[in-house]
Amino acid sequence: MRVVLADLKGPEGFVSKDTVVGGYGSRSKSFTAVTSVLSQIKWRFQVALSVQMAELAAIAAASGHEVVYTRDEFVEGDVAVVLSSLVDYRHETAWADAMRARGIRTGFVGLAASKLPHLFAGHADFVISGEPEEAFMRLIRGEQLAGLCASREVADLDSLPFPRWDLLPAASRLPRRTVPLAGRPLGGGFPLLASRSCPEFCTYCPIRILATYRARSVGSIADELEQLCDRYPRPHVIFRDPLFSQDRDRCLALSDEILSRGLRLTFECETRLDRLDEQLIDRLHAAGLRTICFGVESHSPATLRKVARRPIPPRHQSAIVDHCHRTGIVTAAQYVLGFLQDDWSSIAATIASAVALGSTFAQFKLLTPYPGTPLWKQLEHRVYERDWHKFDGFTPTFTHPNLSADELQFLLGAAYARFYMRPSWLGTYLRVPGNRARDYLRALDDRVSARQARSEIALMSRAVEC
Ligand code: SF4
């Protein structure tokens, strides 16, 4: 059988799917000068690889089937499987329509297809609901899938074959050189899932709504890393687990395994800062850790508790970020603006705390009630946006009790400007050494910040006059 795997490029801006926002996906959006630069960098340089597609490719190839991978081209095959998303579903369903018109049975996999099957069902012969592997194995064994097909989660993740990146031509386009000082290739790296789902309970999070939390063994992860190192020189690996360091001993054992096998690689991971300490960071760094992404979300512990997110003491967050920077690890913090308790002053406080924390990068997004989350149930009556493409994390989607959509958008733009348009941010990025130089840059920040405040006031006054 010739199996077509489609991970379609977004036609409007850079779209990340696969494991991003649990699989609902995200689209870079330019709404200010700073966000325009950030999304241009992604659009031009980033290669987004789907680990789910590479895993399905491995399953099909292991059974002797031919695999054809496409990012937009219509290709001939016996069956086509399309990776679904929320932010680009119209493009995906139009592509599926065209494939079916050519007589090719076509189906969807992914979180969006699982949680909103009605968006895809009219454009597909089958829609796989749940983690796709179990139903996909039935498909390649010859079962004719039709309609909505439930797929059981894989209990033992070690039993799955390793992703076949050699069957995804996009993988060969990954850049080999790292960006000076940023510690990672500009275009990304090989995604790897050492675990799936998340053991935490944040009510706004779509990552934990498809399946339960399970982790792979250290031996299985190290074997996959070794295979990558055998095929690609010094690969950069992106652990896509939302809580990579959930189990400290497992992380230490993995670091030891990487070192004892002599694997030459770099990697980045995502985790909670309360799951890190200096000793663990040092051991992970010795094994190749170069970037850590983590959520801070809001400066207010009370706000975080309202969404079932356990707050982390600010002093611990600062100590970890400072230690990472001393060690040479890039830090990327994530924030959410527009929690129900938020108003102008609480968002200003979150932006100020992001600046004070001093991570290398920061990502700000608007609170978005994603279908299937507890937050969706809580806010469904307030959701006015029915165009799913706009559930991109940058567009207001529900009536906020304290802030209008324009205010939210304005505050989001201000967050990016306040964070990135600082001389001291450049100092952090360039790793400027010495306290005196850093103090000087911070003093310059005050002047820049006063100018930003003037231009923000002017912008708001114009908006009020209109
Ligand atoms: S820690 Fe919370 S936000 Fe992060 S992946 Fe887990 S449930 Fe989601």
Image (cartoon, helix red, strand yellow):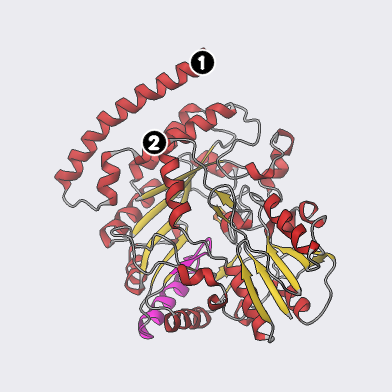
**Quarter residue 157 falls in:** bottom right
Left or right, 393 with reference to 298: right
* Residue 129 seen from this side: no
Quadrant of the rendering where the N terminus is positioned: bottom right
Q: Residues within 10 Å of mark 1 (few under 14, many from 20)?
A: few
Compared to 430, does 198 lie above or below? below
Judged from the image, the secondary structure of the residue bearing numbered disc 1 is helix
Membership of 246 in magenta stretch? yes
Which residue is label 1 attached to? Answer: 464
Residue shown at 52%/43% (left/top)? 29
Q: Is mark 1 within 8 Å of ligand 1?
A: no
Position of residue 315 relative to residue 78, above or below, is above
Residue 245's disc number:
none
Q: Is residue 139 visible?
A: yes
Residue 165 is situated, as x and y percent measured from the top left of the image, at 53, 75
The residue identified by callout 2 is 417
